[in-house]
Image (spheres, helix red, strand yellow):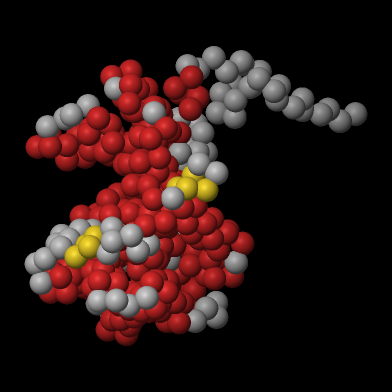
Amino acid sequence: MSLKTPSAAPDTVADGPPGRPDTRPGARKLLHVPHGGLILVLILVCVFTAVQADAFTSSQNLLNVLRQISVNAVIAAGLTLLMTSGGMDFSMGSNAAVTLCVGAQLLDSGWSTPVTVVICLALATLIGLVNGLVVTFTRVAPFVATLASAMLLDGVALLVLDGMSVTIGDKMSALGNDEIVGVPYLTVVAVLVLALIGVTMRFTTFGRDAFAMGGNEHVARLSGINVNWRKLALYALAGVLAGLAGLMLLSRLGAAAPNTAGLQTQLTAVAAVVIGGTSLAGGHGTVIGTVFGVVLLGVVGNALNLLQVNSNYQLVVTGGVLLVAAIINEFQRKSAPGH
């Protein structure tokens, strides 16, 4: 007669002794949830700020945070897919800066908004495609090629403005300031972009090819994937999303000024993507993690402003919070089954 092994009781945990109730503290339970480290740090920051500053939970402040993080979210979305494939583009923030400056100059010169949008997106896509061509056919490391592009584009943005600020009046103000059902249009755009990238990565051949390329490019070639064309498409997509982010930022600010966006914006996006769980080496990426990373950075920045932390300390505090989140995430990854 065969004996059946009894199934685990509902109150047991996979990594504990069979039949023992899960008595771990709430924080430790949270660390076993996907992206639990980020969620824990985010909750702690939100609770602390809400206690210290009543304005943090006001609807006006929350809408302001949503508008602020939407631009970074669009850049981070494109970067998540690109990094999953083993690529990197440090010039997306600078691409956004050039798009913002060109768009402001065109609108200020009397060009119509639809024509300006098309020209800016086409320019941004071209910049991304050039990066892809350099990375694909010269074998220059993506980090080096796109960092050089970032510096070049930051200079181009300054040249376009000639050191002056350019305002666009109320053109594009609806996108930057209006809401639909209480949600800013900018946030709606960001959510749609993130959803599109998420669906692409999870359910399409293009997304699966990106994972395969990031895992092992040589094996991906042998399996029949046209790696070169995929790379060009990925960098072009990163370019168009950078252009969209630039236009979103222009609509929110209503003006273009020197040193708006640029490499600093890009580094923020990279930080959000990396602490969200996307691998710098490629082969692993998650849009959900990127969302948590972007939100954490936005909330920390907003909290520092509300708490009136000296600007000299803001980068120190932000870096410290990111470091803590990254360490917790790494511990969580190593403690997960299979590691």
* Relative vertical location of residue 122 with respect to residue 41 in this rendering, above or below: below
**Could you say which is closer to the camera, residue 252 or residue 123?**
252
Image coords of residue 210 (percent x, y): 48, 67
Q: Nearer the viewer, residue 259 or 331?
A: 259
Tell me which residue sits at (17%, 74%) in the image.
160
Q: Quadrant for residue 238, please give it.
A: bottom left
Q: Could you tell me which quadrant the N terminus lies in?
A: top right
Q: Position of residue 319 (x, y in %)?
A: 21, 40
- Is any part of residue 226 visible from this angle? yes
Q: Residue at x 44, y 50 (%)?
A: 178
Q: Position of residue 235 (x, y in %)?
A: 38, 73
Q: Is residue 292 above or below residue 92?
A: above
86 shown above or below 181: below
> Is 109 displayed left or right of 235 in the figure?
left
Which sits in the foreground, 117 or 282?
117
At a point 47% along the width and 56% down the height, the residue shown is 189
